[in-house]
Structure formats: C-alpha cells, structure tokens
C-alpha cells in the first residue's frame, strides 16, 4: 500500500527507516500488507538520501494522489499540520501522528473529520513515544472505570531530575547535559516548564473519560524551581522528585488534571523510572494499577509507534476504528487546589516550633549543611489552598506536592 510521510525530521526519517528495515515483520503481522513510501513532504533538501526521488515540497502531491491511503504526520506544531491533516481526512485518507500539540489542541475536530469521512486518525506515538498506551487504554482497559492516571511523560525533565538526584548535578548543568545529548531542544521551555507533559495529560484525560481536555484547562508547573536542597531533603524522606502529570476522576461531570513536580516515595513503580525513560501508571477499578514503561522519545522508539499505526490504518482502510472522544466543557476540569487533598513538602525560613504551632501533624526532614534558619517538612493531607492559608506570609522557599502513586 502506498503511504506518505509529512516532515522528515528525527521522527519522520525514523518512520522511513523502520518501514525500510522491518518489511518482514510488518508483512507477517498485517496479513501481507507492504508499506511503500510514495511521497515524503519536507521543505528542506536531502541530497543523497535513499528516498531522494520521492521528496516533494508540495502538499498537493500527496493530497491529490488517489493511491496514497495512509499518511504519517511527523511535522509537529499546529500549523500547517492541522490544515494538512484536515484536508487529508476529508479526502478519505487516514492519518497517523506523533504530534501531541496538535492532538491536544485540535484532536476533537480531527477525530470528527475522520468519523465523517470514514477514515482513521491514530496517535499512539503522541504519548509516551514508543510505549504502547493509547491502544491499551482504549482497548485492553475498556472494561475498567479509570480512577486515575499518573505519568512521567517527559524524558528531558526526567533526565535532568535523575542527574540532580544521582549525581548531585545542578539544574543548569543537567539541562546543559540534556541539550548536549540531544534530549532537550535548543529552546527547552516546552520540556522544563511542563508544556509537553501537559499536552500528553490532555490526550490521556480525553481518552480515559471521553471529553476533550485542552491544555488551557490543565494547570502546569515545570521543574525550574527545583533545587539540590529540595532533592536532598526529599532523599531523607526516602523519596525522589519527579515531574508528574496527574489525572483523577471525580464524578461524571468533573476530573482533576495537572502537571507539577511531585514527591514520589521509593517503592512506587514511578520512583525507579530514571534517565529519559517515561512511565504511565493507570489505576482501573477492575484491574488495579497497571504501569507502562519505556522510551518516551527518540527516533526509532517513536517511529515504531507511528509505523504500527500506519499498519493498523492499512488493515482498516475501509473500516473505522472506534476511537476518540467528544466535546469538552469549560468547568469539566476542577480547580484541584481547592478540591484535592494531599500531603505537601515545604521548605521555608521558619523554626521547627513555628511550624509545630501552624500544623497538627508534620514530619521534619534534614539535609547535610542545613542552615539553622531553614526547615523542611511534609504536612498532613490538605488542599493546597488550605496549606497557603496556614503558611500565610511565612518565607516559603518551595512547596512540592506529594503523590499517592
Ligand atoms: N522533548 C520530549 C521529551 C520529546 O523529552 O520527552 C517527546 O515528547
């Protein structure tokens, strides 16, 4: 079957490589389907590339080729990826993508367009890179009410935090190393400020509960405020700091969803996820906790998920996969700060006796070189709003949520 790739960057070139090198398994597992790369869209030139003859700079070459039935969109960003994907779906072609920004922002419109034209819009690679999570959630866990999801959804930040925890490296040095290793983008804002993880939370929440959740509804905090002092105090509590995306079912009409640094106690599956690896823990009412772990980014891991979606589309070219979600609602995602109770890690310029007078129950932490005017502790369970009410105008240096995953 003729297919096309839009965007020949890291993931797109990985898609071509996986198609080229895994013909045998693709054919065996799909009942004889062979994917033939008929067109690759990219504005750049790739002289000497194996696929040099099929490159085009004109999207219409793909749109108007009736033999191309499946297209991989690995361009990233909203535009022109949205426009191209919409036109392809309306023209009766199935589209698969690794573009989390597009799915999180425009997934509903694109899924509706696919439904109208009897095509498929699949996005396994958009969350967790090579980790199977979209299909397992929508198919294998279909009989469960999902109670909650917690995920380490960004490889770059997990790498930085691992270096801080294990090698005592400062945030700035760890970020520099992540950039040197090619994990973080030159402008690493989307990674370190949590926007990339936020997009993935939107996709998981939309899929789990059937209503579109938009990035603007998910409060997001990155890791740039985390210091080696925090890492050290939390180590003394037998925990680690991870950037977590958390989703919690409240009732038919409400969920909580947020991205933030979180204290994860050793013993949790999520605590042992190191380096650039991702993990997604799904809590179902029948199955209990299931954890999906693997490489959440990178050329071949992400391409492996994109190509699997292409094969799935090729197998279902005249059949729709029942898949996706409906419209969202403005008040659907609650303000977790006033609604959810949890313990908090607090580091502040306070004395222990001042802390004891403020809270009923706290666990004090310690670190090497702790100054006499600094205190760190874990509170009892309470809302974040209540925590700040108690702390008042105390000199707080950092507050980190403690997760129950
Ligand atoms: N920059 C992302 C990460 C890539 O580090 O996980 C995948 O979204």
Image: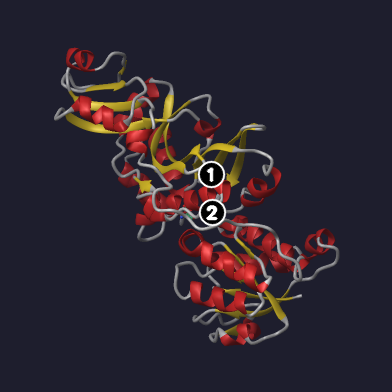
- Tell me residue 113's x, y (percent): 58, 70
Q: How many angstroms separate mark 1 from mark 2 (CA)?
A: 8 Å
Q: Which of the 4 image quarters holds residue 377?
A: top left
> Which residue reaches farthest front?
253
In this rendering, does residue 179 appear at all?
Answer: no
354 vs 129, nearest the viewer: 354
Q: Quadrant of the N terminus?
A: bottom right
- Give above or below for 158 relative to 88: above
Relative to 306, say whether 291 is above or below.
above
Residue 79: image location, x then y, percent: 44, 73
The residue nearer to you, when weighing 192 against 404, is: 404
Q: Mark 1 = which residue?
A: 278
The residue lying toward the viewer, choosing from 95 and 114, is 114
Whether residue 342 sits left or right of residue 320 in the image: it is left
**Badge 1, how many Cα within 10 Å: few under 14, some, many 20+?**
many
At 50% from the left and 31% from the top, the residue drawn is: 271
Q: Is residue 341 above or below residue 173?
A: above
Residue 396 at x, y = what percent? Answer: 20, 30
Question: How is the structure coloured here?
Answer: secondary structure
Residue 15 found in image quarter: bottom right
Crowding at label 2, few (<14), some or many (≥20) Cα neighbours within 10 Å? many
Mark with earlier residue (1, 2): 1
Q: Nearer the viewer, residue 289 or 90?
A: 90
Q: How many marks?
A: 2
Q: In this picture, is 73 found above or below 38?
A: above
Residue 266 location in percent, x, y?
49, 25
Residue that mark 2 sits on: 297
């Amino acid at each position: 079957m003729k297919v096309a790739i839009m965007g020949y960057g890291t993931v797109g070139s990985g898609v071509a490589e996986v198609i080229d090198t895994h013909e045998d398994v693709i054919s065996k597992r799909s009942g004889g389907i062979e994917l033939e790369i008929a067109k690759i869209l990219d504005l750049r030139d790739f002289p000497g590339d194996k696929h040099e003859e099929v490159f085009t700079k004109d999207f219409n070459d793909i749109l108007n080729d009736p033999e191309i039935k499946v297209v991989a969109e690995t361009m990233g960003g909203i535009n022109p990826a949205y426009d191209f994907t919409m036109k392809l779906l309306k023209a009766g072609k199935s589209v698969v993508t690794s573009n989390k920004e597009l799915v999180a922002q425009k997934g509903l419109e694109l899924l509706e367009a696919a439904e109208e034209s009897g095509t498929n819009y699949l996005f396994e690679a958009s969350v967790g890179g090579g980790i199977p999570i979209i299909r397992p959630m929508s198919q294998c866990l279909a009989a469960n009410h999902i109670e909650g999801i917690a995920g380490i959804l960004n490889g770059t930040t997990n790498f930085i935090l691992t270096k801080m925890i294990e090698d005592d490296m400062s945030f700035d040095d760890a970020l520099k190393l992540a950039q040197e290793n090619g994990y973080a983008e030159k402008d690493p804002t989307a990674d370190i400020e949590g926007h990339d993880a936020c997009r993935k939370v939107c996709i998981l929440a939309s899929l789990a509960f059937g209503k579109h959740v938009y990035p603007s509804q998910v409060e997001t905090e990155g890791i740039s405020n985390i210091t080696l002092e925090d890492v050290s105090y939390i180590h003394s509590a037998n925990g680690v700091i991870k950037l977590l995306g958390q989703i919690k079912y409240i009732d038919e009409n409400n969920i909580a969803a947020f991205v933030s640094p979180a204290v994860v106690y050793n013993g949790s599956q999520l605590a042992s996820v190191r380096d650039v690896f991702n993990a997604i823990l799904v809590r179902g009412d029948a199955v209990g906790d299931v954890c999906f772990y693997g490489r959440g980014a990178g050329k071949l891991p992400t391409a492996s998920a994109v190509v699997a979606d292409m094969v799935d589309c090729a197998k279902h070219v005249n059949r729709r996969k029942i898949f996706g979600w409906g419209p969202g609602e403005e008040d659907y995602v609650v303000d977790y700060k006033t609604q959810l109770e949890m313990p908090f890690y607090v580091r502040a310029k306070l004395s222990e006796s001042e802390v004891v007078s403020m809270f009923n129950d706290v666990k004090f932490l310690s670190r090497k070189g702790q100054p006499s005017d600094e205190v760190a502790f874990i509170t009892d369970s309470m809302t974040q709003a209540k925590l700040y009410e108690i702390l008042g105008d105390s000199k707080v240096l950092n507050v980190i949520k403690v997760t129950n995953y």
